[in-house]
């Protein structure tokens, strides 16, 4: 059976607890308790190996998890297992509608090291030829970022801060190529063009001959059209 992306995972405890997922027993709707390390591991993975989700999804389950006194080193091992699982099961040809989900999941599991960055770049290059056009904007959000900081929190920022200039050059060029495809196909990319220029300028990244002035101009035009459209919709 094909394994679903992290955001859709429903983990089983063991053979005796078939069809029981963390949070609730599917038959009785009774909550499953975390009573040992193995169950804590499965719950941690079901939360995307992410404390942000773990702490907010269910306070009682979070308390049970923390009661197991899991070390950060152990969590890193579990996170590595999940990263390798998603990487090895990444589909480039089938289930195209889920490519961006796998890609986002892989990014969220990464640590700042050569092993993870090299594999994420490998996946990024592999999906370019099969990425549906309606997912370009979503993949750009992962590569460029879309948070409210000046550097926007994407892979470009991570690669730049890590110092792998060879990988940085490739990810920057991939982002530019996707932006060009979006321009040629008249696809909306949110504010990604402007964010791309923001990251380049804020981190003082060599933009490898890319015409960032052109991108900034296109971003301003697209933003003007966006706000004009919203204004008309509001009238």
Image (tube, rainbow, N blue to C red):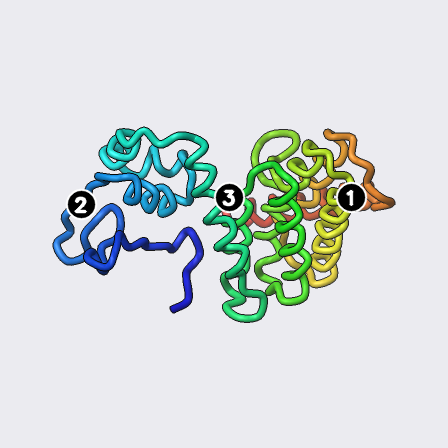
Residue depicted at 67% across the width and 44% down the height? 224
Question: Picture coordinates of residue 123 (x, y %)?
Answer: 62, 56
Which image quadrant for residue 112? Answer: top right
Q: Which residue is mark 1?
A: 166
Which of the two residues, 51 or 144, is positioned nearer the viewer here? 51
**Element at badge 1?**
helix
Residue depicted at 82% across the width and 37% down the height? 206
Q: Which residue is mark 2?
A: 31
Q: Which mark is residue 109?
A: 3
**Element at badge 3?**
helix
Q: Crowding at label 2, few (<14), some or many (≥20) Cα neighbours within 10 Å?
A: some
Q: Which mark is residue 132?
A: none
Instruction: Answer whether residue 193 is visible to the viewer in this image.
Output: yes
The span from disc 1 to disc 2 (Cα, nearest Å) is 49 Å
The span from disc 3 to disc 2 (Cα, nearest Å) is 27 Å
Q: Residue furthest right?
A: 209
Residue depicted at 87% across the width and 45% down the height? 209
Among the two numbered marks 1 and 2 on one chain, the one whose residue lies closer to the N terminus? 2
């Amino acid at each position: 059976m094909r394994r679903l992306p992290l955001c859709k995972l429903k983990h089983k405890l063991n053979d005796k607890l078939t069809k029981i997922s963390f949070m609730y027993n599917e038959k009785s709707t009774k909550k499953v308790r975390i009573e040992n390390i193995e169950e804590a591991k499965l719950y941690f993975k079901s939360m995307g190996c992410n404390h942000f989700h773990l702490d907010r999804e269910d306070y009682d389950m979070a308390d049970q998890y923390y009661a197991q006194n899991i070390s950060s080193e152990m969590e890193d091992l579990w996170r590595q297992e999940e990263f390798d699982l998603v990487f090895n099961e990444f589909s480039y040809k089938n289930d195209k509608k889920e490519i961006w989900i796998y890609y986002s999941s892989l990014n969220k599991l990464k640590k700042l090291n050569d092993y993870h960055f090299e594999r994420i770049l490998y996946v990024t290059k592999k999906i370019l030829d099969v990425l549906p056009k309606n997912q370009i904007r979503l993949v750009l959000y992962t590569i460029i970022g879309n948070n409210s900081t000046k550097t926007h929190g994407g892979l470009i920022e991570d690669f730049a801060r890590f110092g792998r200039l060879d990988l940085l050059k490739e990810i920057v060029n991939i982002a530019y190529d996707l932006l060009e495809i979006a321009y040629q196909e008249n696809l909306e990319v949110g504010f990604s063009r402007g964010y791309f220029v923001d990251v380049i300028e804020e981190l003082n990244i060599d933009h490898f001959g890319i015409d960032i002035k052109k991108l900034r101009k296109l971003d301003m035009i697209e933003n003007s059209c966006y706000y004009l459209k919203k204004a008309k919709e509001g009238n």
